[in-house]
């Protein structure tokens, strides 16, 4: 159980760290797409931004489960798979020291992340509690006139569920809450201080949110923000979603009522009120009010900014090129240094005995890489282990036993376990030209530079 827990912490830590560059690339790609779409297509911009936000949560989840899967952990499960640990390494000591430091403090990283998520979850719960208090019958009062008007507007907006209208005296601004039972809360001050025709346009805006189930989508968005709070790209993407969400609600209200200028006037009146509404609720004052007013008064068609597009594309291309180069370098390093020392000797025998028809089996530790035990890493244990490995005629690794120990039992067992659980087959050996079951000797070096 402790080994599973250690692997889970290891996988989660690296998933969170890898999302640093993954989130950056996602935000850059979104910026390129939004620049091509232009500001006039609010629905397309909203859908694209929301897909990017979903991708942000899917990327670390995918990384976590890949690292937790049996195939992944047997080949590359250790965080030290990110750095070479065998002899013959020619890499920067600074990067190695930093990677080792990350490996040793992954549990601390995960712990800090969990504490911050817990705090944000409490904040989210307080927001939900705030909404529950204001929707309680003791804090909100029905209004027969506006309830009748809401019922009529529900038919105009083709909303099947019944929308409830309530007036709250100490509320700062109009909000929409509820998933199954949508409810519009209106401040008592606005009910008496704003003309009925303008207030009706604000209610129409809220009906646009209800029609698109924005309250539920906003809860999902807030949950993703909570889990990926540490990345600025997530907050930037989330901001784009909220801006476009308000503009879409404006479009729906203007189209159904046929009064875009009256809605713009209502928004200008709304700017005179001070609001303290939590982001969990959908409020008519969300987004940039001035931008929304201009958009309603005169549709804005923005041409593509080609200079910005090429700049962003250049940044994305550079990031992808650097990442690809790093992967190739890492793969080459693993191929060269991740193989047991005996492999080169085995290849030599492969050539010397080729005329005789005898060939030694070959094991590539790049495919059967052991995990560096965390306790051994903390103690900075190193050494060379020699093993006898039984390779079947089909290349299956049948058995492995230690012949010469590193002096550290955990390091020895890690190599044995990696070989016994390896899913990748070795190159089988031959006797008299035919594949046969053969014992071979290999060495594995644990070394930190």
Image (cartoon, rainbow, N blue to C red):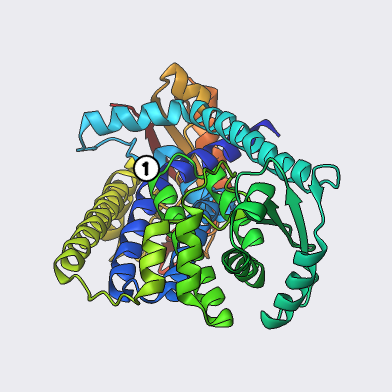
Position of residue 149 in the picture relative to residue 243 (left or right): right
- Element marked by disc 1: helix
Decide: is 440 above or below 46: above
Q: Residue furthest left?
A: 307
Q: How crowded is the residue under tag 1: few (<14 C-alpha within 10 Å), some, or many (20+)?
A: some
At horizontal 21% and vertical 37% (from top left) the residue drawn is 91
- Image position, residue 137 (x, y; %): 85, 47
Indicate the quadrant where residue 341 lies.
top left
Q: List x then y, in percent, for residue 100.
A: 37, 29
Of 195 and 246, the residue lying toward us: 195
Looking at the rendered image, the quarter that the N terminus falls into is: top right
* Residue that sits furthest to the right in the current view: 137
**Residue at image mark 1:** 82
The quarter of the rendered structure image containing the C terminus is top left
**Which residue is nearer to you in this view: 429 or 34?**
34
Residue name at image x 49 percent, y 75 percent:
251
Instruction: Name which residue lies at 75% across and 62% down.
Output: 182
């Amino acid at each position: 159980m402790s080994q599973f827990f250690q692997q889970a912490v290891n996988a989660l830590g690296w998933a969170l760290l890898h999302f640093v560059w993954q989130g950056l690339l996602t935000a850059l790609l979104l910026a390129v797409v939004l620049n091509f779409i232009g500001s006039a297509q609010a629905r397309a911009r909203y859908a694209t931004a929301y897909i990017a936000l979903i991708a942000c949560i899917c990327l670390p989840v995918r990384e976590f489960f890949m690292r937790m899967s049996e195939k992944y952990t047997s080949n590359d499960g250790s965080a030290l798979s990110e750095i070479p640990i065998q002899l013959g390494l020619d890499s920067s000591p600074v990067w190695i020291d930093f990677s080792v430091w990350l490996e040793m403090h992954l549990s601390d990283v995960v712990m800090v992340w969990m504490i911050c998520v817990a705090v944000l979850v409490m904040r989210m719960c307080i927001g939900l509690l705030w909404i529950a208090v204001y929707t309680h019958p003791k804090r909100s009062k029905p209004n027969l006139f506006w309830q009748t008007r809401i019922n009529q507007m529900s038919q105009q907006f083709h909303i099947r569920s019944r929308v409830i209208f309530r007036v709250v005296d100490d509320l700062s601004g109009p909000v929409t809450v509820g998933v199954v039972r949508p409810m519009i809360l209106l401040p008592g001050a606005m009910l008496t201080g704003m003309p009925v025709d303008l207030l009706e346009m604000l209610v129409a805006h809220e009906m646009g949110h209800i029609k698109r189930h924005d309250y539920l989508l906003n809860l999902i968005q807030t949950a993703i923000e909570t889990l990926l709070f540490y990345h600025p790209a997530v907050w930037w993407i989330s901001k784009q979603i909220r801006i476009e969400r308000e503009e879409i609600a404006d479009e729906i209200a203007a189209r159904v009522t046929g009064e875009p200028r009256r809605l713009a006037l209502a928004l200008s009146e709304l700017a005179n009120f001070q609001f303290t509404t939590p982001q969990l609720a959908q409020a008519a004052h969300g987004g940039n009010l001035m931008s929304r007013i201009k958009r309603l008064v005169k549709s804005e068609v923005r041409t593509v900014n080609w200079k910005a597009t090429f700049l962003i594309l250049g940044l994305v291309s550079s990031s992808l090129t650097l990442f690809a180069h790093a992967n190739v370098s890492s793969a080459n390093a693993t191929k060269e240094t991740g193989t047991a020392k005996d492999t080169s000797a085995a290849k030599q025998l492969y050539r010397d005995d080729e005329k005789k028809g005898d060939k030694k089996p070959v094991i590539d530790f790049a495919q059967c890489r052991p995990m560096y035990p965390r306790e051994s890493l903390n103690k900075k244990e190193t050494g060379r282990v020699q093993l006898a490995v039984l390779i079947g005629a089909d290349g299956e690794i049948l058995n492995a036993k230690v012949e010469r120990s590193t002096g550290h039992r955990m390091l020895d067992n890690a190599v044995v376990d990696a070989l016994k659980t390896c899913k990748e087959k070795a190159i089988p050996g031959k006797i008299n030209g035919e594949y046969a079951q053969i014992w071979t000797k290999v060495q594995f070096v644990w070394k930190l530079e």
